[in-house]
């Protein structure tokens, strides 16, 4: 049969496709408003740290949010994300504010930074 794959050919094709998938890395594509792939937030800089505002269905806590600090550019870039999707339905939906100190974010007080997330408002 012409064009039919043998078991060995199918195995090698599957391994090649798997290896190709492992080699590629997803990239965030920057726009003027940050990275649209990230959840919208607002960040307010205070004396000792940042206050993060984000939408919530009522069950997101501080431990549910993680961050990434990128220092490969002139200005540090900070991105926030949830560790997992918020699926609760019994909480009160609204906006929550979470506080992070500059030390735990890896920033120095007064250091310039950008937030990669799009604006919440």
Image (tube, rainbow, N blue to C red):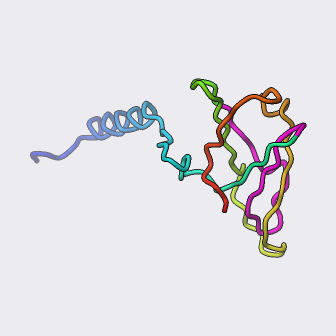
**Quadrant of the image for the C terminus?**
bottom right
Foreground residue among 95 and 48: 48
Residue at (78, 48) in percent of width and height: 44
* Residue found at x 73% / y 63%: 55
| Residue in view at x 43 percent, y 34 percent | 24
Highlighted range, magenta: 47-69
Q: Is residue 71 left or right of residue 93?
A: left
x and y percentages locating residue 104 in the rendered image: 84, 32
Q: Is residue 60 magenta?
A: yes
Q: Quadrant of residue 19?
A: top left
Q: Residue furthest right?
A: 48
Q: Quadrant of residue 111?
A: top right
Considering depth in this image, is 82 or 53 the residue closer to the camera?
53
Classify residue 11 as left or right of residue 44.
left
How many numbered discs? Answer: 0
Q: Position of residue 56 (x, y in %)?
A: 76, 65
Task: Work out which residue is located at the far left of the displayed protein and give it.
Answer: 2
Q: Could you tell me which residue is drawn at 43 percent across and 30 percent down?
A: 23
Relative vertical location of residue 11 with respect to residue 58 in this rendering, above or below: above
Q: Position of residue 8 (x, y in %)?
A: 29, 35
**113 relative position to 20: left or right:** right
Q: Position of residue 113 (x, y in %)?
A: 68, 34
Query: In the figure, 17 relative to 59: above or below?
Result: above
């Amino acid at each position: 049969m012409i064009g039919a794959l043998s078991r060995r050919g199918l195995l090698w094709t599957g391994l090649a496709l798997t290896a190709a998938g492992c080699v590629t890395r997803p990239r965030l594509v920057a726009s003027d408003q940050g990275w649209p792939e990230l959840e919208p937030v607002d960040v307010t800089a205070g004396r000792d740290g940042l206050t993060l505002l984000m939408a919530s269905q009522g069950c997101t806590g501080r431990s549910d949010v993680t961050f990434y600090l990128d220092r490969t550019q002139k200005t540090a870039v900070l991105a926030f994300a949830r560790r997992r999707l918020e699926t609760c339905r019994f909480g009160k939906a609204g906006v929550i504010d979470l506080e992070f100190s500059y030390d735990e974010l890896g920033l120095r007080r007064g250091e310039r930074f950008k937030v990669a997330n799009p604006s919440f408002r």
